[in-house]
Amino acid sequence: MSIGIIPLVSPMHDPLRLEHQMSWLREIERSGGFRFELGTPDQPPPTDLRLYFVRTGGTEQLFRALYRQIAGPIYLLVYPGENSLAASLEILTYVLRMGGRGEIVQGTPPEIAERLILLTRSAHALKRLGQARLGIIGRPSDWLIGSHVDADAVYMRWGTQLVDVPMAELRALIQPSAQHEDWLVKTAQSATSCADHAPESLDWVQGIYTALRRIQEKYRLDGLTVRCFDLLSDFGQTGCLPLARLNDGGIPAACEGDVPALFGMTLAFYLTGQAAFMSNPASIDVEKNQMILAHCTVPMTLVSSFSLPTHFESGLGLGVRGKMFTGRCMLLRMGGSALDQYWLSGGEIVENLERSDLCRSQILVRADEDLGAMLANPLGNHRIVVPGEYAELFQTFFDHAGI
């Protein structure tokens, strides 16, 4: 991993006297496991993240002269001496007055390295989103009345292309198959229990998964969402297990044609490399700041064990009842016509539940942020759950992206 660095130094300073700063930079590199790639204002390094290394005081006018050719947020790396911080404070104030965004990065080498890792991951994820093609197979489900997005606005804001794929095209590709791929054989063998009709439904799981992969490859999709309830009316089967497999294979896949959920799951994958659990909030205890989240599919990489019962609402096909690992997690919902709004919270997966009146995979989560505020401005239904301590990383991303 490389991080671009553009030094700023006053001509009043003797370059030989500043040589000690190079060993300080190398200490940051060792702490973070990355390397700095040096550049100049005229030839900036081709990295996702660039820093302006304010080596000395007296660099304010140097920065001002080049500011208008800089795009994106300004990150100022501060050396603990040589009036670097003094100049950086003045520079950041100028950036903010000009309507720009920026941050002073300072501290011990390990502290700086930790911050730079978060910023680099955020910059890389933003770049990947700008190159992503996300498929919408069929229209969003009819009940998602508050989750509409504007494809043009999303492209203008993020660079992400939303690709419409007719449901009829997927429908024409689906054929049940008794030739199960290895992943499906192992999934069936690993399930603690299965619905009585599992042998027949597994053939449909294979057929639906194969059809989704063909759509994904044809349209060069980096992720997809499908109007999955149409599979129930058309075939009497579900997409729960095929979508779980896509997520486990690094292709973010959302239910119900929910584009904000898909975008959030894609962002989660780009930031963490993990699959995410797309869930319905089933109930909220405002006093305890806890909520129950449930859905009929969950990636197998997020669970310690699972069974394959029927889909909850319909009693058809196969759903996934997974026992997720307890511990820290991140909760996310994105919304707005350009997907430029978000709700974010750290949290704790407290326990798994097995209620009969909810979708099959169920968790009780304690949130860090006020759930009462979420109820006042929910941005839609589905919450994205990513196991791990990632709230700071996601907040860094949103700050870097300017929302």
Image (cartoon, rainbow, N blue to C red):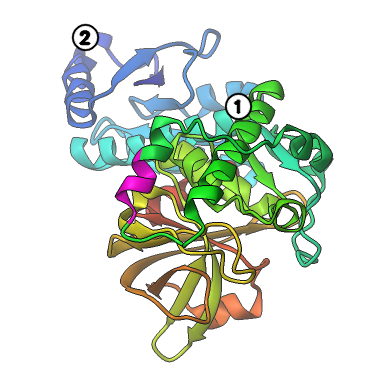
The quadrant holding residue 225 is top right
Q: Residue at x 62, y 46 (%)?
A: 263
Query: Could you classify mark 1 by the number of other residues whose Cα lies within 10 Å: few (under 14), some (14-19), or many (20 or more)?
Result: some
In the displayed structure image, the side of residue 212 where residue 143 appears, left or right? right
Give percent across and percent down for residue 358. 52, 77
Residue 244, relative to residue 334: is it above or below?
above
Give percent across and percent down for residue 353. 37, 76
Residue 183, relative to residue 149: is it above or below?
above
Q: Which residue is mark 1?
A: 67
Give percent across and percent down for residue 37. 36, 13
* Res 16 label: 2
In the displayed structure image, the side of residue 143 where residue 113 appears, left or right? left
Q: Which residues are magenta?
A: 186-191
SS label for mark 1: helix
In the displayed structure image, the side of residue 366 where residue 343 appears, left or right? right
User: N-terminal of the two: label 1 or label 2?
Assistant: 2
Q: Residue at x 47, y 80 (%)?
A: 356
Q: Nearer the viewer, residue 11 or 103?
A: 103
Residue 45, relative to residue 402: is it above or below?
above
| Tag in front: 1 or 2 | 1
244 within the magenta span: no
Please state which amino acid type lies under the numbered disc 2: Leu
SS label for mark 2: helix
Circles 1 and 2, Cβ within 8 Å, touching? The answer is no
Q: How much space separates mark 1 and mark 2, taking CA atoms?
A: 27 Å
Q: Nearer the viewer, residue 51 or 94?
A: 51
The overriding secondary structure of the stretch rendered in magenta is helix
The quadrant holding residue 147 is bottom right
Please state which amino acid type lies under the numbered disc 1: Tyr
Quadrant that contains the N terminus: top left
- Give the residue at the far bottom of this rendering: 287
Residue 377, relative to residue 221: is it above or below?
below
